[in-house]
Image (cartoon, rainbow, N blue to C red):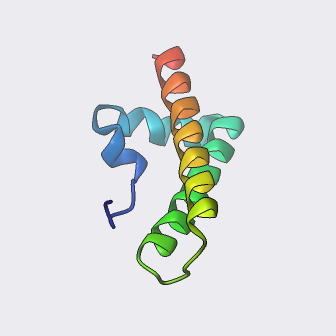
Amino acid sequence: MSHVPHELHEDFPDDSDRIHELKQTDANFRKLAERYHEVNRAVHRAETDVEPMDDDELTVMRKHRMTLKDEIAQRLHQSA
């Protein structure tokens, strides 16, 4: 288990500029990225015991983060 947040620009290093551009020009992408950031930070806080949570709840949040990341990857691929 990694105690380092999964930041979008680190997960998609080749798409950093495109992520920035879509955040500026596409309201739906911006909301998707913001939601990813919120869930990602909550997972990170739970993993580092800053805000501990039940293992089942943490698993659900990790799956949600993964779903959001998949949606972001799909949007990046479509817009390329």
**Residue placed at 46% from the left, 38% from the top?**
19
- Where's residue 3, x and y in %? 33, 67
The residue at the far bottom in this view is 50
The N terminus lies in quadrant: bottom left
Is 73 on the left-hand or right-hand side of 7? right
Above or below: residue 32 compared with residue 59? above
- Where's residue 13, x and y in %? 29, 39
**Residue placed at 49% from the left, 74% from the top?**
45
Q: Give 52 or 65, whichever is nearer the viewer.
A: 52
Q: Give 43 or 19, whichever is nearer the viewer.
A: 43
The C terminus lies in quadrant: top left
- Where's residue 23, x and y in %? 57, 42
Q: Give 31 or 49, whichever is nearer the viewer.
A: 49
Above or below: residue 29 compared with residue 76? below
Let me know if residue 34 appears in the view: no
**Residue placed at 68% from the left, 46% from the top?**
31
- Where's residue 6, x and y in %? 39, 54
Let me know if residue 50 appears in the view: yes
**Residue placed at 46% from the left, 81% from the top?**
49
